[in-house]
Image: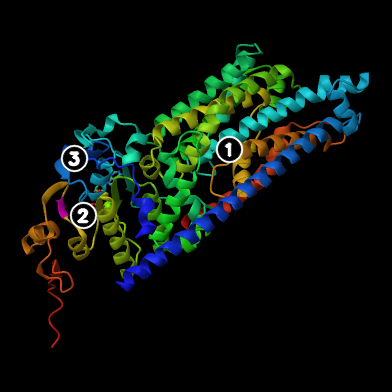
Amino acid sequence: MTTTDERAVRAEHDREAALATLAVVRRKRLSRRLVVTIGLVVVAVAACLAALSVGDLTVSPLQVLLTLTGGGDDVSRLVLLEFRLPRLAVDLSVGVAFGLAGAMFQSVLRNPLASPDIIGVSQGASVGAVAVLLVAGVSGPLVPVGALVGAAAVAGLNLALAWRGGVSGYRFVLCGIALAFVASSILNYFLTRTDSRAAQGALTWIAGSTISATYADFWPVLVVVVVLLPAVLWLDRRLGLLEMGDQTAEALGVSALRTRLVAVLCGVVLAAVATAAAGPVAFVALISGPVARRLAGDGHPALPQAALVGMSLMALADLAAQYVLPDAQVPVGIVTGIIGGPYLVWLLATGSRRRSA
Amino acid sequence: MSATDTVAARDGAEVPSLVAHGVSLAYDKQRIVHELDLDIEPGQVTVIVGGNGCGKSTLLKGLGRLLRPDGGRVELGEQDITTMSSRAVAVLLGLLPQSPIAPEGITVGDLVARGRYPHQGMFTRHSSTDDQIVAQALADTGTADLADRRVEELSGGQRQRVWIAMALAQQPKVLLLDEPTTYLDVCHQVELLDLLADLNQRTGTTVVMVLHDLNLAARYADRLVVMRQGRLLCQGTPRDVLTPATLQEAFGLEALVVDDPVTGDPMMVPVSSRRRPRS
Ligand SMILES: Nc1ncnc2c1ncn2[C@@H]1O[C@H](COP(=O)(O)OP(=O)(O)O)[C@@H](O)[C@H]1O
Ligand SMILES: [Mg+2]
């Protein structure tokens, strides 16, 4: 009898202890998330201010704020509102779209390599966009549509090739890498078949560039991001559960197929419109998710944080792209490529070790 | 046992039945389970045994709606399980697969709390009731002192108990477990099975599990289900089922069946041609 009583007392004690620890665990997790999110917002705002201030004409941050709120002198109005702001808007929206798309693909395929720029989605979007630009010879709102068609075609083909009564992340990534090469070849074919001046413009675009960005590039991305926001919030929690394996997620009431479908669809659309706006800017999609995850550090996909990382990354990289060389701008994709290349090497070098552990 | 009231405090609805009617299960058209009929008794502990690769996990997946039947149907509470939403199933039925994945960096407390997911709405996050239930699940599985540790830092046995805690936090009325004692040392195996037996007694939760250890299966099962090559070989009480003839048929094993000196349940002792009584 005493042993039963003792056990009951111990169980009660354990439960109280667990309750206390749980509260601490949750508080720690949420406060870290909060700090990380605020930190990322601060970085993003600082990046924006820097992007608007720095240039041939330096506009002081105070002057920037004045101008944005309707004041300021004519020169800074012209420089900011006509040139720097549209470019920054494109950078930010494209960063958000790529950041989200990358984080979603990586989560849903459980593979840090699975970002749209590695698995052919961005390349497909490029083919679609370039086909519209060069072959059909039109620009404007048809470009994002072309990009969407190209991205969806590659993703759909990939799905068909990798499908075995379900999708394994590994096979999807491998097929995607192969399709990325195919898409790149088609792209090169288009370029060699068109006259050099048009091809030159397309080449800059393919490197990923916001040099000639206007609000016309920005609006489609913004609209898509805003429209998909509910889906992103819907996915944030489900993707976390799906990472425990399809079966565990299903057992907890998450439909694996539907979640995966929504995530892939959102990822394709986001990557496509971002690519249409700024070209296939390398590595932003690849890096943002893992950086956000590592910062949040709690095993959740951290989609909002990935969007913030993507945003800052694009703004800062584009700033560097404008001013690293003394008298020429480089496409932003070259800067992100220089940042992303070593990261990819590091990922490949350490990835297999961690997977086998 | 006032400490266990929170887990026992269910909404009073009765435990649903779980029945397989001529269920066939296949991967890529390759049939693994063939037209199997099985009536899981509500409120009982059913243990599925059988040789490696005979389809135990596959059957469990079929019963838990993780695999769509290739023929026949599974009914949960007299409703075809494929017509129910994932969430509707998850509220009633929990399933712990053989190899779940812990996301990198997640803490034990956080992982176990995910078991509450099917009970939460789109916007309602953790309530204090959820916390109570999660704490209870942690305490019941002896993982309370691990709550702030990262899952990847744990030993296999500790991790296994954490997953069980997550399944308990789900508070399903029917709980399916695929080899829950894997990775556990003997002491923790018995503790875990005691815990499940206790849960079954206290709350009437139906427990269905795959076990490898036939003697533990005989001790803890109300009903024993023996499978061979995707079919039901026999089922019944451990006393009826665990016989030398069945062991020969199901496992190709020559064995004696004696009485378990502790509980009086049947207990099998394999006969080996290599090892003879020591002189
Ligand atoms: N996901 C799968 N795809 C294809 N075949 C599978 C899969 N899972 C299991 N099998 C096959 O089904 C058979 C039964 O497997 P399983 O149900 O896991 O057996 P048990 O759990 O009884 O050891 C095995 O031959 C196995 O190879
Ligand atoms: Mg198995």
> Is ligand 1 within 8 Å of the beta carbon of the residue shown at mark 3?
no
Residue A68: horizontal and vertical position, in percent?
83, 24
What SS does tag 1 mark? helix
Asked if one can make out residue A189 in the rendered structure from this viewpoint, the answer is no
A255 shown above or below A17? above
Parent chain of label 3:
B
Q: Mark 1 points at which residue?
A: A303
B162 shown above or below A293? below
Dot 2 or dot 3: first in sequence order is 3
Q: At label 2, which amino acid type do we have?
A: Val
* Residue at horizontal 45 percent and vertical 26 percent from the top: A156
Q: At label 3, which amino acid type do we have?
A: Val
Q: Name the residue under label 2.
A: B47
Q: At label 1, which amino acid type do we have?
A: Leu
What SS does tag 3 mark? strand
Mark 1–mark 3 distance (CA, rounded to whole Å) = 41 Å
Crowding at dot 2, Cα within 10 Å, few <14 / some 14-19 / many 20+, comes out as many
Asked if one can make out residue B214 in the rendered structure from this viewpoint, the answer is yes
Q: Which is more toward the observer, A310 or B156?
A: B156
Residue range highlighted in magenta: B223-228
Q: Kindly indicate the quadrant of the structure image that contains residue A78.
A: top right
Parent chain of label 2:
B
Q: Kindly indicate the quadrant of the structure image that contains residue A120.
A: top right
> Which one is in front in this view, the residue at disc 1 or the one at disc 3?
3
Residue B86 lies in magenta, yes or no?
no
* Residue at horizontal 34 percent and vertical 66 percent from the top: B188
- The answer to whether the residue labelled 1 contacts the one labelled 3, judged by CB atoms less than 8 Å apart, is no
Q: Mark 3 points at which residue?
A: B19
Residue B69: horizontal and vertical position, in percent?
23, 35
- The answer to whether the residue labelled 2 contacts the one labelled 3, judged by CB atoms less than 8 Å apart, is no
Crowding at dot 1, Cα within 10 Å, few <14 / some 14-19 / many 20+, comes out as many
